[in-house]
Image (cartoon, helix red, strand yellow):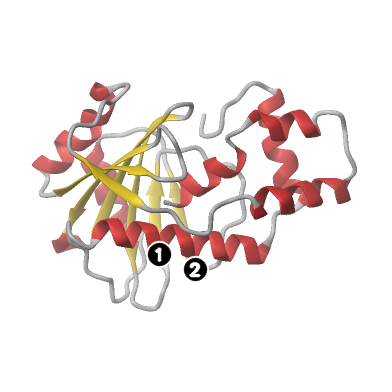
Amino acid sequence: MVVLAIWWLFGKKILGFLLVRGVAKGALKEIGKSALAQQPDWITLTKISDPQWRNRAAIEEWTTPLRAGGFIDAGVFTVDKMPGVKINILVKPTDCVMANVYEHPQAGTWIELVSHYRNGESATLTTMKDLGMTRPSWITSIFVGKAPAMELVQRLMTERRTGELIAVSPERAPRQFEEGYAKYMLGKKNMGLSAEEVATQVKRWTEGKPVGK
């Protein structure tokens, strides 16, 4: 859910259009503040029974080995405030891992693995590119290249810190996703966006690099 929030912040060319003309650092911070203010504080997932994937093969490249590796499919969901986004959520209760497989109209497909701790912290692993965004201190993020799904799961389990983990289940997973997004967005709005963060994303747009690529 973290990478989805980041993509939504900087996944529109309008921000790059406003900034490519060389604005001052103070103006960059103001535009970052405005961009954050426009983001929804909460999202709602809706389960769909017959998802029309743009690239079903890319989705199944992740989901098929996850199911074979013991993950339970919680379903495919749309996001109310993000048209075109679909998320296949799978969980492995024995390892307290949630797998979110995304399809985005512009960013394509990627996977995010998440474990939540009782103390409020989270460990994430994602194949989306590190966008250079400062994250709240309670999130530990691992950015990786594409690899077999179960290898990524093993890496998360190996590298996440020890601690009491929150259980996951197919029934609870959608709500956990919504809560994770809301917590991240609240934290990011409290932190604000630095001029450097905004400038980095603008540079990506001017170089023709979509977010996550």
Q: Which residue is at 53% across, 59% downward?
A: 41
Q: Which of the 4 image quadrants contains residue 23?
A: top right
Query: Callout 2: helix, strand or loop?
Result: loop
* Mark 1 closeness class: few <14, some 14–19, many ≥20 residues within 10 Å: many
Tell me how far mark 1 sits from mark 2, CA to CA: 6 Å
Marks 1 and 2 close (CB-CB < 8 Å): yes
* Mark 2 closeness class: few <14, some 14–19, many ≥20 residues within 10 Å: some
Q: Earlier in the sequence, mark 1 or mark 2?
A: 1
Q: Which residue is mark 1?
A: 122
On the image, the x and y values in percent for residue 187 come to 57, 65
Q: Which residue is at 28% across, 71% downward?
A: 165
Towards the viewer: 87 or 133: 87
On the image, the x and y values in percent for residue 207 come to 68, 22
Q: Which residue is mark 2?
A: 138
Q: Which of the 4 image quadrants contains residue 172?
A: bottom left
On the image, the x and y values in percent for residue 208 come to 64, 21
Which amino acid lies under the numbered mark 2 shown in the image of this protein?
Trp
